[in-house]
Image: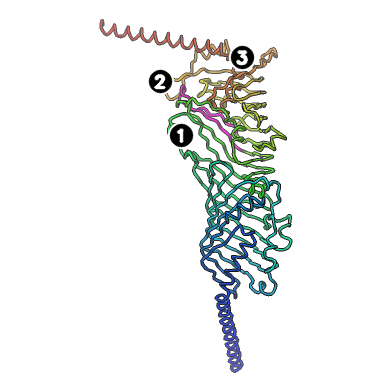
Amino acid sequence: MIERTRKTVKALKWVAGIVFLLFVIADAMSWYLSVKLRPVIMKELKELVLNSTDSLYRIEFSKVNTNFLLGNASVSDVRIIPDTNIFNKLIKLKRAPNNIYEVSLKKLTIRNFHPFRIYFDKRLNVGRLLFEHPKVVMINRQFEFNENKPPRPNKSPFEYISKLLQEVSVNTIDLRDVSFQYINRNVPVPEVFAVNKLDITLKDWLIDANSATDPTRLYLLKDVLINLNDYEYATPDSLYKVQMNELSFVASTGKLNIRKFGLVPRYSEMDFGKKLGYSKERYNILLSDISLNGIDLPQYVKKQELVASEMNITNGYVSVFNNNALPSLGIARMGKFPHQLLQLVQAPLTVKKLNLSDVDISYAEYDSDSEQKGRITFEKTSGTILNVTNEEKVKAINPFMLANLSTYMMGQGRLTVDFKFDLNAKNGAFSYKGQLLDMDGGYLNRITKPLGMLKVNSGRVKKLDFNVVADEAKASGNLNFAYKDLSIGLMKKVEGKNRLVKLGLFSMLANSLVIRPDNPDAKGNMIAASLYYQRSPTSSFFSFIWQTLLQGIKYTVGLTPEKQAEIDAQIVKFEKMKSDREKRREARRRRKQVNP
């Protein structure tokens, strides 16, 4: 038994030794082949890049390391450089691409390139190409002769390699931690956009007799995957930071996902305008779970035209604030409505359908008279926006952007609004109609007290209907406001006090002589309001809509400009009488001190 065990151990040692010897011999042969074939590989690699790109690109590198035993290799100090002379010739021949690229990196790693297939089958099959920390510059220049061309080469690269190889394929091309720079040369002064920490994966790149005409491939690829995490950059005015978290894109499905997008102001609501020295709207935006479907990647690569069949935004908020106590620059804010700003976006953009779900929207102002903030909120806003575009060819078919939204005003009353924006109107023409149902009027105090110095003591909104046609200068339409048991209180700011003080006497007079407590009244008479509001050229889109509707609401309850003027005049008269009385009282007190 012992003798048999010794023989077994001895046999295993011989086997291990032979295996080790074979490995050493194979490794030595791999090293020998690597050294001997390195000049050939370097030459063939350069010719492969040159031939497969129709001489548009050349590759430069310092050295190549190969291991034929493991089928691995690496290329150091790599640069892929476009030949501008060839590019200009291709332009004249109307064969030039819209984009040319410059790529540089310290090391390119090649995994599993199956060297024996090159010799026996004339097939260069690579498992993985890894580009670590590459710098990629993409230069875009659009040519009319490339319009409507499919996403494939003008001439199959197979024609250039067929004498040497029958197939070149790479299963996965990974570009990790990419520094990407896009240069737009379609404008007089080239524009530059840069992004870092980008990961790009290219799947199943193939050159063979049929790949160039395969309709399932994009530029010889089966798929493109893009990922970007925790991206942030400052806006040119340094007032905001744009933040994106977990962006991913898959070309085969045309789907882009963004977990979070934020436009974050650098300063608080009150400090924002103070830093500027004048009144300016401050935006604070955070949107979650954003997805775009049906993105045409070849169209975007070729023309930087973003076309999506559908966009979804689930959860988030949009907050707008303005400090009206600060001086205005007095600059007319023309061309600043949402659909007008959309037309100013330089890159072509079309989203056929935008779905919103549970987005909170708020608009707030700080009032110089009340020295308080008034805020109106629209919570859990959901709905659809159709035909979001700045593309002339799309607008030629349909020039209107439609928004159908439902929300809860102040988190209470259900409000539905339909907007219709004329995308071609130079004067910013748009219209909107909607309905507010069943709301306790007391919730409006968050905006009526600070901005209107008016408190709703009681009242129930039964139904508010409105229909408005507007442009940059004016708004007109009609408003029907059905309510019950309305009672108001007039407020004023008293020097030295942080809160508003109620004008008891004038509130009583307003309720008894001016305010209609019910609409319709006990006899069923319904008061409707005709709207006509002239916009201040410096007011915002949100303020314009709010002030137009507020005018109609005031008219309906009885607070017409004439009645408001009467009340204001009485308040001034009363304040003067009160001041005179205080002066007389003070004079009597002084006389008593002189003549006790």
Looking at this view, is 125 or 363 the one in front?
Answer: 125
The amino acid on which the numbered mark 1 sits, given as a three-letter code, is: Phe
Q: Nearer the viewer, residue 69 or 265?
A: 69
Label 1 with label 2: CB-CB less than 8 Å = no
Which quadrant would the C terminus be assigned to in this image? Answer: top left
Q: Quadrant of residue 548?
A: top right
Q: Residues within 10 Å of mark 3 (few under 14, many from 20)?
A: many
* Residue lying at 29% horizontally and 8% vertically, measured from the top left: 590
Task: Verify whether residue 364 appears in magenta.
Answer: yes
Check disc 2 and give the amino acid type. Answer: Glu
- Which residue lies at the image location 47% right of the left edge and 40% below the top edge? 238
356 versus 145 height, above or below? above
Q: Give the x, y percent position of residue 231.
A: 53, 48
Please give the label number shown on residue 272.
Answer: 1
Quarter the N terminus occupies: bottom right
- Give, as a single range, the part of the protein colored magenta: 359-378
- How far apart are the two marked residues, 3 and 2, measured between alpha carbons? 32 Å
By secondary structure, the bulk of the magenta-drawn segment is best described as: strand
Cα–Cα gap, marks 1 and 2: 26 Å
Q: Position of residue 49 (x, y in %)?
A: 61, 62
Q: Residue furthest top?
A: 595
Residue 85 drawn above or below residue 528: below
Residue on which the image places disc 3: 516
Which residue is denoted by mark 2 in the rendering? 495
